Image (spheres, grey):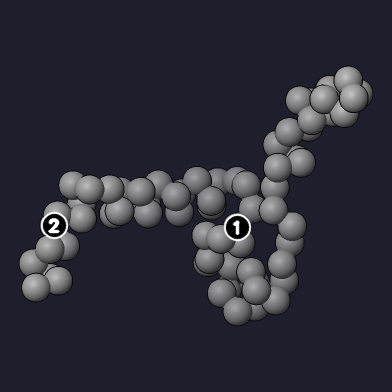
Amino acid sequence: LQAAVEIMERQGGLLSDRPRLIAAGEILSGGQSIGFLHNGVKLRQMRRVLHTHLQPKAAEAYRPLQI
């Protein structure tokens, strides 16, 4: 058990990544779906963009478009 914990602590970044889904993640979405991205710079950039547009203050700006 201790050996497994040590491996997870040392290689946690490698072990926490999503599996590569070629059909869904690359062919169908062109690699632009946040649900299929691997850990890295692109995922952090997309999360940052989504977060800025989906927080409550930003949602209030969309209200006139919904009416």
> Marks 1 and 2, how far apart in space?
28 Å
Q: How many marks?
A: 2
Dot 1: element: loop
Residue 37 to residue 31: above or below: above
Coordinates of residue 40 in the picture (x, y in percent): 60, 46
Amino acid tagged 2: Ala
Coordinates of residue 10 in the picture (x, y in percent): 79, 26
Quadrant in which the N terminus is drawn: top right
Disc 1 versus disc 2: nearer the observer:
2
Q: Which residue is mark 2?
A: 61
Classed neighbour count for the residue bearing mark 2: other residues with Cα under 10 Å, few (<14), some (14–19), many (≥20)? few
Left or right: where 60 falls relative to 6: left
Classed neighbour count for the residue bearing mark 1: other residues with Cα under 10 Å, few (<14), some (14–19), many (≥20)? many
Camera-side residue: 55 or 45?
55
Residue, x 53% and y 66% (percent of image)?
Answer: 33
Left or right: where 15 falls relative to 58: right
Left or right: where 15 falls relative to 27: right
Residue, x 57% and y 74% (percent of image)?
Answer: 30
Coordinates of residue 47 in the picture (x, y in percent): 44, 50
Task: Determine the image quadrant of residue 11.
Answer: top right
Check the image and name the residue furthest to the bottom: 28
Q: Which residue is mark 1?
A: 37
